Image (cartoon, rainbow, N blue to C red):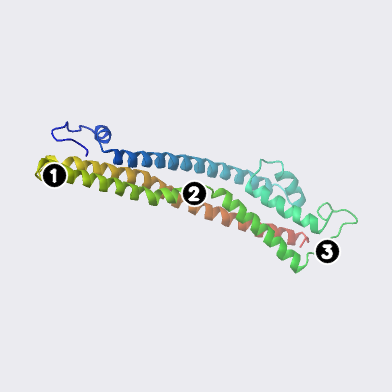
């Protein structure tokens, strides 16, 4: 029970939490951990997306400075690792295995175009790399959805404990006046508020990050298609 009969009335939210029942304190402690984990993931993913945007800008600026695929490859491979140059490297490595020396324009290199089977294999390799980069960037984001859905349920659990405390207060005082009901209701509202405070930022961040990952995967797929088009223009496929 949140307050014993004749006990002091909490004057602040902190006092209300400290004087709440052990069950409610456990629920609030779990919600606090969930909230900290949520904010850690939010800050981590924000930093990763910020870093990704910078890497993309540098990568495409370097690509625009070159006219041929071989020059572009030498230039972008000097940049820090990013999903874009990893995808580029995967494409060039796979092509070089199919046509050794073709990109170096060696005299005895096999410059014949790729067969349809080889071209489809190249597309599959690039598609696999895009999926791997998407999954890597989306790591930890599902935890935000879990916190967003479980948080209100935990808050509801604390609310049930608070309502139980309210009824215990009514039973102990033998009346249903405000002084008997208010402490339990206040405890219930604190638990509900804790669940919402943990869930709302997680849900908002989850929706934003999922949309950003979707856009990122689309950008990578577009770059993969553009890369194949460039190879076709230079007579490599």
Marks 1 & 3, CB-CB < 8 Å contact: no
Q: Nearer the viewer, residue 124 or 181?
A: 181
Q: Secondary structure at mark 1?
A: helix
Considering only order in the chain, which callout, 2 or 1, is on the residue closer to the N terminus? 2
Residue, disc 3: 112
Work out whether 134 lies above or below 15: below
Label 1: few (<14), some (14–19) or many (≥20) C-alpha neighbours in 10 Å:
few
| Camera-side residue of 103 and 189 | 189
From the image, state whether disc 1 or disc 2 is nearer to you.
Answer: 1
Q: Position of residue 109 (x, y in %)?
A: 87, 57
- Circle number at residue 55: none
Which residue is the site of mark 1? 171
* Front residue (pair 124, 168): 168
Quarter where residue 18 is shown: top left
Residue occupied by mark 2: 141
Q: Residue at x 53, y 55 (%)?
A: 214
The image position of residue 174, as x and y in percent, is 9, 43
Location of residue 204 in the rendering, given as x and y in whole percent from the top left corner: 41, 49
Q: Residue at x 22, y 38 (%)?
A: 2
Discs 3/2, front: 2
First in sequence, mark 1 or 3: give its number.
3
Residue 123 placement, left or right of 138: right
State whether residue 85 appears in this view: yes
């Amino acid at each position: 029970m949140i307050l014993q009969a004749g006990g002091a009335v909490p004057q602040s939210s902190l006092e209300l939490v400290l004087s709440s029942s052990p069950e409610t304190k456990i629920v609030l402690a779990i919600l606090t951990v969930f909230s900290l984990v949520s904010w850690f993931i939010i800050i981590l993913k924000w930093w990763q997306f910020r870093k990704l945007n910078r890497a993309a800008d540098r990568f495409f600026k370097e690509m625009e400075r070159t006219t041929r695929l071989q020059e572009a490859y030498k230039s972008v491979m000097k940049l820090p690792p990013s999903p874009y140059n990893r995808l580029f490297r995967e494409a060039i490595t796979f092509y070089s295995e199919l046509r050794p020396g073709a990109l170096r324009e060696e005299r005895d290199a096999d410059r014949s175009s790729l067969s349809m089977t080889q071209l489809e294999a190249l597309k599959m390799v690039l598609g696999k790399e895009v999926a791997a980069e998407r999954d890597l960037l989306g790591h930890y984001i599902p935890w935000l959805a879990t916190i967003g859905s479980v948080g209100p349920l935990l808050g509801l659990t604390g609310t049930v404990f608070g309502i139980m405390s309210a009824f215990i207060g009514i039973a102990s005082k033998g009346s249903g006046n405000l002084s008997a009901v208010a402490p339990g209701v206040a405890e219930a509202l604190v638990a509900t508020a804790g669940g919402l405070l943990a869930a709302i930022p997680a849900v908002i961040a989850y929706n934003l990050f999922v949309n950003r990952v979707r856009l990122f995967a689309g950008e990578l797929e577009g770059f993969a298609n553009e890369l194949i088009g460039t190879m076709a223009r230079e007579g490599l496929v």
